Amino acid sequence: MALMKAAVFVEKNRIVLNEKPIPDIGPLDALLRVTTTTICGTDVHILRGEYPVAKGLTVGHEPVGVIEKLGSQVQGFHEGQRVIAGAITPSGHSNACLCGCGSQDGVGTAHGFKAIGGWKFGNIIDGCQAEYVRVPDAMANLSPIPDQLSDEQVLMCPDIMSTGFSGAERGGVTLGDSVAVFALGPIGLCAVAGARLLGATTIIGVDTVAERISVARRMGADHIVDFRQGNVVEQIMALTGGRGVDVAIEALGTQATFEAALRVLRPGGTLSSLGVYSTDLHIPLGPFAAGLGDYRIITTLCPGGKERMRRLMEVVASGRVDVSPLVTHRMRLDDIEAAYQLFAHQRDGVMKVAITP
């Protein structure tokens, strides 16, 4: 039995490099030889035991690689082809997909949660922080990488870019909008870029880390609010002349940022929530106008599937968005445990770590 190296969830606060069998594939699957992947904030939630997964699961959900083997019924691809697959892998034929919400393909009750959506890699099936990964429903999920793009240029597409952009898209950002983005981590930075692409003309980023603030300005932030320099809500209201923002994007996943995002909305504004919450969330009576403020609160699980990936890679290839500053560190899969320590504790100015098997 052929073995591979893989980052495996053992127990709370323990993800270790181990050996596992190279996955078998079914007729509609593909076996991908992973050439580059990365660590996501959601993986840190798994590491800390805040999001439960099965012991022994290979983690990771952002694969870039080369097709090693194709299932017998897969058409339109060839072995040796460079591809990515989204973090979300819809089948294309479920009720959720046919209703136009492929990101929720697979909704059910698992791990004590009401819904898991279409997030399978590193959640309910083995993920891609490994030398190989099985991609289910390959024809719906593999997307060829344009020859002129490197692995690192497309590394954000499977999750971070798709999620950040969808925060702006689902929030309904349009021409002339004012947008506040709470937390300028990789997802928040991509939300900034997405809001700019959709036509927002006043983009306010909220953070305090100098490196992130610098990248945010490059990606389209017009103003920065440093939460250590005073009341965030008051600063944003002052920047908007007391009007409030059209869309507030919450990209951290805490009660405090969610509540602040609600407080800075104009009447009838939209709170677009991207954060993964690890505790119960409460909606405060006052900022919610007792339910009478015509507010919208929407959530997003990053859109996946091959067409979404194709479009995101086209955005990168066009030069309209440069996500290369997000990759701040590069490490080998052999050093995955050290990479988790670096990323989980946000040391050395880390934003994203490119992991190469």
Image: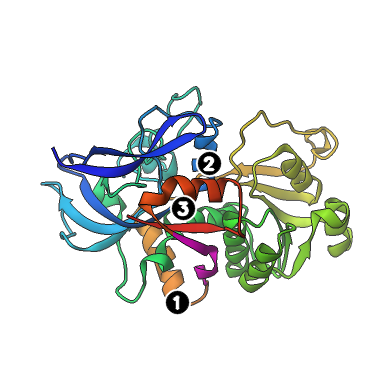
Camera-nearest residue between 177 and 235: 235
Instruction: Decide whether residue 196 is among the magenta residues.
Output: no
Foreground mark, 2 or 1, reads 2
Mark 2–mark 1 Cα distance, whole angstroms, equals 32 Å
Q: Position of residue 262 (x, y in %)?
A: 76, 44
Q: Are marks 2 and 1 in contact (CB under 8 Å)?
A: no
Residue identified by numbered label 3: 159
Mark positioned earlier in the residue sequence (2 or 1): 2
Mark 1–mark 3 Cα distance, whole angstroms, equals 19 Å
Q: Secondary structure at mark 3?
A: helix
Residue identified by numbered label 2: 44
Q: Residue at x 17, y 39 (%)?
A: 26
Mark positioned earlier in the residue sequence (1 or 3): 3
Q: Is residue 136 visible?
A: no
Residue identified by numbered label 1: 318
Q: Residue furthest left?
A: 72
Q: Secondary structure at mark 2?
A: helix
Q: Horizontal placement of 264 versus 132: left or right?
A: right
| Residue segment shown in magenta | 322-330
Name the amino acid, label 3.
Asp
Name the amino acid, label 2.
Val
Foreground mark, 2 or 3, reads 2
Name the amino acid, label 1.
Ser
Q: Position of residue 20 (x, y in %)?
A: 26, 37
